[in-house]
Image: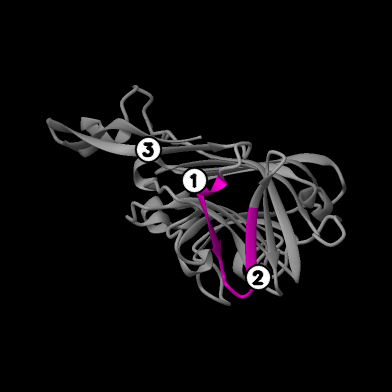
Amino acid sequence: FIASMKSTNLLRTGAVGLMTFTTSMFAQLVIDDSFDDGDWESTWIVQHNAVGSTTVEESGGDLVMLNQGTNQNGGVASIESFAPTEQGVQATFVLKGVFSPDTGDLARPTANGLFMGVVANNGAFYRASNNFGLAFFGNENRTASAAGYGLIAGDRNGGTPSDHFFDDEDIDLESFADGCTVNITADVEGWSYKISDVLDLDLNDVTFENSGKWADTGTSFEAVFGDDPEWHIFVSCQSGPSTEHVYESISLSPKEAELSDSDGDGIEDGVEDSNFN
C-alpha cells in the first residue's frame, strides 16, 4: 500500500503584539508494504554500490534481497519521495533475517553492515548521499556499530566517520540475524528508535530504545536533513561474498512533532507572544 495525502500545515511567525498565520499545502507519503501482492517493483527500486549484483523478489509474503559478490552492498529504496521538513520521519522495519543463500544459516553483514533508514537520493548508492538511520554490525569508525548498532546521519564520507552520531549499543549477533522489529523517528525536536526481538550480550531478551534532542549532540534537524524535499525510505546490506536479507514489512508514515511548551500554558513556545519580548 502506498499513498500520498494532502495535509494542511500552519506555518507560524510571531512578533511582539503580532501573530500571522499562513497555510501551506503539501503531500505526505504513506507506505505500508507487507510484500504479499507480488508487485514490489511498483513501490521500490534497487539501490546498490555496483561491485556485484543485487536481485530482489517477493516470496511467501517476504521481500527477499540477494547480494552476490564480495563487498556488494545493496537493497531497495522507495520510488516515491517525502520531505522530512514537512512530515518528519516515522519508519518501521520488520526484518525476518539475514542468511547465507548457500546454507540457509544465519549470516553476519560485512564491512558497512546492514542499514535501515532514509536516504536523500534513490538513484545512487546510499553512502554517496545524505542518510539517517540505524547501522547494524558495520564499520566501528564510520557508524559505531561493529558489535551491535549505531544511530547515525550522514554516512557518506568514504572511509571516514559519519557526520553525526546519536547513540549506539552492543547486541547479540545471532538474535539480530534471526530477525527483529525496528522503529525510527525524527522531527524538529529530536530523534528516537526502538529495536525489539533481540538479545543483549548476556542473552537476555531486551528491547533497546532511546530518544534525544538534536541539541544534545550539538546539531539541529536542519543540519541533519537540510532542505532537500525528496527523501526515500530504504534498506541495504553488505555481503561477503553472498548474503540474503529478508523483510516481512516496511512502512513509512508522517511523524507529528512534539512541540515545546516550556511554561505549560498550552501555547507552543515558537508562537507564544511572551517568548518574543
Image point (74%, 62%), residue name: 243
Q: Is residue 155 visible?
A: no
**CA distance for labels 2 and 3:** 33 Å
Disc 1 target residue = 42
Q: Residue 134, position in %: x, y?
A: 60, 53
Left or right, residue 85 beside residue 31: left
Residue 25, above or below 244: above
Q: Residues within 10 Å of mark 1 (few under 14, many from 20)?
A: few
Image point (54%, 76%), residue name: 158
Q: Is residue 225 visible?
A: yes
> Of the residues tagged 2 and 3, which is closer to the observer?
2
> Of the residues tagged 2 and 1, which is closer to the observer?
1
Q: Residue 247, position in %: x, y?
A: 67, 46
**Residue lying farthest top?**
265
Question: The disc labelled 2 sits on which kind of residue?
Answer: Gln
Disc 2 target residue = 72
Question: The disc labelled 1 sits on which kind of residue?
Answer: Ser
Callout 3: SS = strand
Disc 3 target residue = 28
Question: The disc labelled 3 sits on which kind of residue?
Answer: Gln
Left or right, residue 81 beside residue 217: left
Residue 46 included in the magenta stretch of the image? yes
Marks 2/1 in contact by CB < 8 Å: the verdict is no
Circle nearer the N terminus (2, 3): 3
**CA distance for labels 2 and 1:** 24 Å
Q: Which residues are magenta?
A: 40-56
Callout 2: SS = loop
Observer-nearest residue: 106 or 67?
67
Callout 1: SS = helix
Image point (31%, 32%), residue name: 6
Observer-nearest residue: 203 or 62?
62
